[in-house]
Each structure stands twice: as structure tokens, then as C-alpha cells.
Amino acid sequence: MGMTLLPFFILLPLICLCKSDDRLTPGKPLLPGDKLVSNNGIFALGFFSPENSTSNSYVGIWYHDIPERTYVWVANRDNPIGSGLSGKLVLTNSSDLVLSDSRGRILWRTTNNVTARADGAVALLLEGGNFVLQLQNFTQIWQSYDHPTDTILPGFKLWANYKTHTAVHIVAWKGSQDPSTGKFLLSRDPSTGLQILTWRGTSKYWRSGLWNGAEASDKNGYMWSQNVDDGETIYSTYNTGNSSSRRSHWKLDYTGDLMLRIWSGQSWVVLFKRPGDGCRQYGSCGPFGYCNMPTRECRCLDGFEPADGFSANFSRGCVRKEELTCCGYHFSALPGMKVPDKFVYVRSGSFEECTAQCERNCSCTAYAYANLSSIVATGGPSRCLVWTGELVDLEKTGVLGGNLYLRLAGSPEKSKCGHNRKSGIGVLLKIAFPVISFLLIFSCIYLVCICKRRGIQVNKESWKRPAPDHSSTSQEVWDQNFELRSIRFEDIATATNSFHDTNIIGKGGFGKVYKGTLEDGKEVAVKRLSKGSEQGIEHFINEVVLIAKLQHKNLVRLLGCCIHEDEELLIYEYLPNKSLDKFLFDTAGKSILDWPRRFNIIKGVARGLMYLHQDSRMTIIHRDLKPSNILLDVEMNPKISDFGMARIFGGNEQQESTR
């Protein structure tokens, strides 16, 4: 018996020496040539240099059991070990991983708030390719899954917190043999968590469809399962289903393509690739255009035509064949669509309620509804999405898409709509006319009393201007005591498509107003003042100095400004319903201004004037109040705008001029 076991005991030390180690402990550094191998033999961690490059070296994780070296994680991607130097990865007594070179320079390290004994922590390479740092009680205090590079492995959670607007990011390599940070980034949309975005620098490059909370899988058994955590975080986990033994991963390539790859036994096979070739790049078909997946070419939505006529260039998108009005419209159902970007999530219990949400808003251009009662999803058993502007980044995807309800002009009930409104207009006038007359008389008496009480008299000489004279420089403007965001001219030009005429939403004596979309998706109105106009400069300074100091819900909000060479630009919040005169003097618009809405507008304007004249830190006279300078938000609430001619009335002055 003893002689039988003797060979076993002789070979046992050799067996132990041949077994790869999967852990790093204090006092046992990882040196060039060493590696950690996961228990299942699939992954290895160690030092490497990319192919065709011997100058720099890195610490990373790769597939250990396939012949083609494929890296899935890099620790020091932006701080390589230089040519001719060696590196060392150690686990310190303070439970941190530290990578340094032979000159003693620290190139990469982990940080945590845990202090443990020298033998209290261990670094493990798990079977799924996750490199973790954990204590003796198995508490993980750091993991590589929280700091990914360009690869998503099975079990990785792609999360976004839509309360704090934060998300985990995947960043591509800079080149095929350069693991440093590249120009493409992927994350779940941090504002909603409902879609995945790829960015090229600060511009969107590709966008997935909206997630509905269900598991999405394919015939190969690869799936994403979406989960909702505590009402703040959404995450999706990539699993391999019944194919757990196969090697697979998602990779954000340095070219910007997101790919699902599996190992066939001889090479990597791409099962999924986005955006790839064709028109799948973000917004490539322009506003109101969509990418038709069967042919991979741009087309216009129903009721629209190319903005450039019959040109094959869709960069400007499509325009309506018939202008949309508030009265006389219908919704056209477009099945199998990847819904547009820049949606507004509305809590709604039924399809009818979602439809009503769009019908009540004249600026609503489309809506989409999804019944999610059978699955776990954000916001409850249903989801209503509404769009109030241009529709961007659409795809015709077939069975993978949903229904998009597009608002188009013309309706069989158009005459009925007009008849119903006309039938009640006589009664409305009989009631509204005496009420409005009474309010006007009461307002005049009230203003006379206020003026007498204050002893305000008209004088031509004593106006105090709030800003320097026409020779003011940009520095003098910034010397005023206010806080205002300065926005780069390049960002404004990008937001307005280089101030294209199709983005013009208004014109005035001092310049033009453009609609723009900033990098974060926020829609803004950009006032571009006429070059070389002294009145325009005075107008600009007045707006900056006055509006920046005013805060009231019935005053338009100034978001920032820009002074660039001979350009002066003002950036305001974008109000989709534009100005009051568009409703007062337009037949279709006038019909939706029922008495409750008119009365609400009157009250809002009065509140804004009361704030300017009495309740603000400064007494300000607008001097140019008219319907075109009263803007309306999405709920038809009024906001007073255009303070270019406004003047400040000194608190200790008794005479002012309004000329």
C-alpha cells in the first residue's frame, strides 16, 4: 500500500507547482513573466505589450485558453511602462493595488476607504474575468468591472442612475494596437437609463432602441436582461444563456462600432455590429427622416418631403408637405419604428391618456405608448413618450420596433372643429368683453394710484443706464456684477447648424433668433445680434446686465452669452409655443386661446410686470412690451422677453424719462 502511494506523493509537489495561481497577496508581487490565471483557465492577468509594439507595456486581462491574444481589460491604459523599464504590481498592507515601474514611479493604483491587516485582503481573478479586491470576510472593496475599458463580459452590469445623471462608461482603444483612451465612448443614457448611446467626443454617434424592461435574446442564446433597482438605477446584464462554455463578449472597437463577438474555435465571429455601414449613425437622415433598414437608405416620414428637393443628401432632413396647425390634424401610426431621440417621459395609465397628452399641446409632433404590464420597467406598467420638436434619429426596424404616432396636418373632422369653436364664439364674446373691459379699467385706476403714491414724473434728462456706452468692450461687460455662463462660439455654431436659415425662428430690428440644440440635448434659442450696430451693442449689454439679475417664472430665462470677435450672442431657454402674437393674429392659433388661457396669460404678464416695477431688487421699465415679446412655454404660460430697450429706475429718484 505504501509503495503504491509513493509515486503519488513524489508527483504531488510537481502538481502543485504546475497549477496556476489566481490570486495576489501582500508580499507576493506580480512581475513581468508572471501571470494570474482564473480557476477555470479561461482568463489570465499579467504584463503585456501590444503586437507590433515593444516600446510600452501594460497590465491587463486576456483570454488564456485561445491562441489569438485578445485583451478584455487594461489597468494602466494611459500610463504605460516605458521602453527599457520593468514593472511591478503589488498588494499593499493598506489593501490597495499599486503598479509601479523600475524607477519607482506609480503608474496606476486602486483606492478604497478600507484599512485591513497585512493578511486581510487578497486580489482574485474570478472565472468570469473580473479582477476583484476582497477582504477575509469576502467583502469586495474594488473590482475591475467598475472600471472597464473597451469590453463587456458576461455578468457585467451596464448601469445608469437617472437621478444623479451618472453612468458607467466603456471607452474604446485609440488604435488597434494602442490601448490608450480613444475617441469613442459608450454608456447607458444617464438622463433616462432607457437607451444606450455611443459618443464620438462630445457628439452622439449611435443610439440603441429604447429598453422596455424585458429580456432581449437571440437564437444563439445571448441575451441582455434589464432590471430596475430602487427607482434610481437601471442596469442591464449581458448573459450567455445556455452557451456559458463559449467565449463571447461585447467590444467597442476603435472605429466606433459596437460588436458582439463569439469564438468559433478558429477566429472571432461578429454576430452584431452597430452602427456599421449605411445610415445607422446618429441623425444621419436629418430631422423627420428615417433609416430604412431593409435597404439601408434614408427616407422621409409620411407627410414629409426632402428639404433639399430630390437631392440624395439628407443632412437637412425632411420638411412637412403641409404646415401643422392646432385645429385640423390627425395622427398617423408608423409601425416597426425605433422611436426618435429627445423624448419627454410622461406618466400615463392608458393609450387614450397618452394620446390626450399630445393633443393638449399644440407643439407636440408625435407620441409613443407601450404597455409594460407583463414586465418590470421604469415608471410602472405603461410608458408614454412625447416629442415637442423635430424628430431625430429614427429607424424602420420591423418587428423589433414599436408604434410611433405622428401628428400630421389635415383631418376629416377639421370642419367640425371649426364649427364647434365658431358656434360658441358669440357666447364667449358676450361674456369675455365686459370682463376684459372691467379688468382694463381696474388696471388703469390701480396704476394711476401707484404712480401718484410714488410721485413719479416724466423727465427727459435723468435716466441711469445699466451698462457702459457704445464703446464698451467685452471686458467691461464682464466687469458688471452678475453671474452668467459664457458659452463657446464653436458650441453655439454647432448647436445651430452653423446658423443655417432653416434654424431661424424669429427676426427683429437688432438681429435674428435661431433654434439650437446643445451637446447635452438641451434646446435653446440663440439671438445673434447684427454686426457693427451700436444699437445692437446697447441691446446686448442691456439684456446681459438686466436679465442675469432677474429671476421670475414669468420672465424669459437667459442661460448664457458669447462675445467672439465681432459676434454678440445671447442664449435663452427655448419656448416651443413661440410668441403671443402668433396666436392672437392667426386664425388657427386664435381658436385655441379660450378664455381660461387668455386670462392665465393676462395674469402671468401682470405678475411679471409687478415683479419688474415693484418686487425685484431694481425697478425696471420694459419700454417695449407687445405680443411679439411675450413668449409662451409648453403649458402656454407667458414669459416677458426682449429687455434690449429696458431701463433701470433708481430707488431714490423721483423723475424718469420713458423715451
Image (cartoon, rainbow, N blue to C red):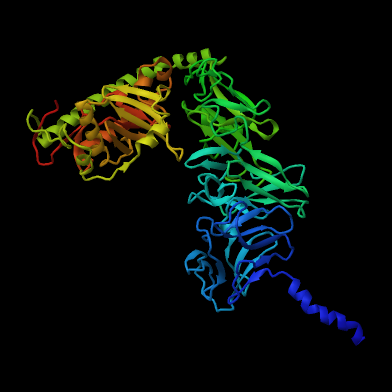
Q: Residue at image x 51%, y 60%?
A: 82
Task: From the viewer's side, name the closer residue of 219 and 6.
Answer: 6
Q: Is residue 199 left or right of residue 502?
A: right
Outermost front residue: 84
Q: Residue furthest bottom?
A: 2
Say whether residue 656 is left or right of residue 585: left
User: Is 453 situated above or below 535?
Assistant: below
Q: Is residue 348 above or below residue 81?
A: above
Residue at 57% over, 14% down:
412
Locate the C terminus and report the quarter of the image it occupies.
top left
**In this view, 61 is above or below 587:** below
The answer to whether residue 635 is seen in the rendering is: no
Examine the image and state in which quarter residue 507 appears: top left
Name the quadrant containing residue 155.
bottom right
Looking at the rendering, in which quadrant would you find the N terminus? bottom right
Up-down relation of residue 296 to residue 381 (above or below):
above
Q: Residue at x 55, y 16 (%)?
A: 411
Q: Position of residue 199 (x, y in %)?
A: 52, 42
Residue 108: x, y in percent? 51, 63
State whether residue 273 appears in this view.
yes
- Residue 388: horizontal and vertical position, in percent? 48, 30
**433 or 314: nearer the eye?**
314
How many marks the image carries: the answer is 0
Q: Please state which of residues 602 and 503 is positioned toward the viewer in this rendering.
A: 503
Front residue of 7/607: it is: 7
Q: Residue 552: x percent and y percent? A: 30, 40
